[in-house]
Amino acid sequence: MLDGGNSMVVSAHRVRRRQRRRKEILEAAYHIFREVGYAAATMDLIAERADVAKGTIYLYFRSKEDLYFSLLVNGLDIVIELLQGVPVTASTRTGMLTRIAEVLCQFYKSYTDYFRLFMVMQQEDMQSRMTTDIARALNQRGTIILKLLSARIQCLIDEGRYVPVDAWRAAAVLWGAFIGIAQVTIAKEDLSSKGEDIYDIVTFCFRVLDRGFARQPAEGLLITSRARNRKKR
């Protein structure tokens, strides 16, 4: 009979084993989706790549769609981890945005096919298959990403390097710009069309945004409501 201490050790081991198996299945799915595309991917192919029985996959994921959306959550977790490595303080404005550009482009180059998966999600029929739990998980990750970006922008505002812009909206602009550039880059790569390196485009875009945030914008453009109230007094 196991005592309490041994029981906890066994339980912890089982949790780690399940986490490891789940990660292995996600990695297998990522490679299969990359190689054959979402539509042609099957649970049999994923099970073969993960070296598990197909039934084992269903212990972790309800369907191919559930596995696909879980993979998207996993991709956003990677972005979050990279952004958390960007210091909240920076010696210069451009240093902050350059570092953010570097980590986002690092994610793109290391995990390009996540963006192809993101593009599949934009199809109407895919969104209807998303469970409430997955939708909540994706929204939570998106919120965390915007919080990480806005905290770093707020730092520049507090240091007087930016005018009092709405940090949350500025973060949404940065993130949206990066996603848009990444999708255009993928489209060009798929068409074998030559173009600039994504890092050059992203850093150029961020530099333009940096200059806009650093100078007084047009009346009412990005100034926060608090700043507007101060101006009226």
Image (tube, helix red, strand yellow):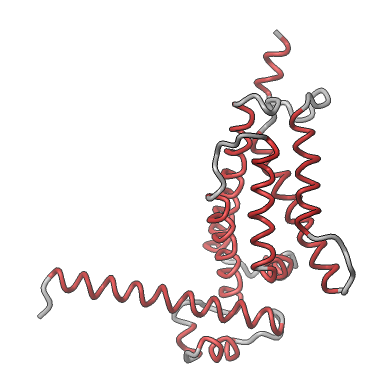
Q: Position of residue 227 (x, y in %)?
A: 68, 20
List the single residue furthest toward the top. 233
Left or right? Give the position of 57 relative to 202: left
Please tell me which residue is depicted at 57% across the width and 38% down the height of the picture.
151
Would you place residue 169 above or below residue 31 in this image?
above
Q: Is residue 119 above or below residue 46?
A: above
Q: x%, y% of residue 2?
A: 12, 77
Relative height, residue 99 to residue 61 (above, below)? above
Q: Nearer the viewer, residue 95 or 117?
A: 95
The residue positioned 54% from the left and 57% from the top of the image is 136
> In which image quadrant can residue 164 be found?
top right
Quadrant in which the C terminus is drawn: top right
Q: Is residue 49 left or right of residue 96?
A: left
The part of the image, by quadrant, that contains residue 170 is top right
Residue 16, picture quadrant:
bottom left
Q: Position of residue 133 (x, y in %)?
A: 52, 62
Of residue 58 and residue 224, the one placed in the foreground of this image is 224
Quadrant containing the N terminus is: bottom left
Q: Is residue 183 above or below residue 56?
A: above
Write the residue at 63% across / 54% down.
Answer: 103
Relative depth, front residue between 224 and 58 = 224
What residue is drawn where x is 69% and y is 83%? 35
Residue 8 placement (x, y as % from top left): 21, 69
Q: Residue furthest right?
A: 193
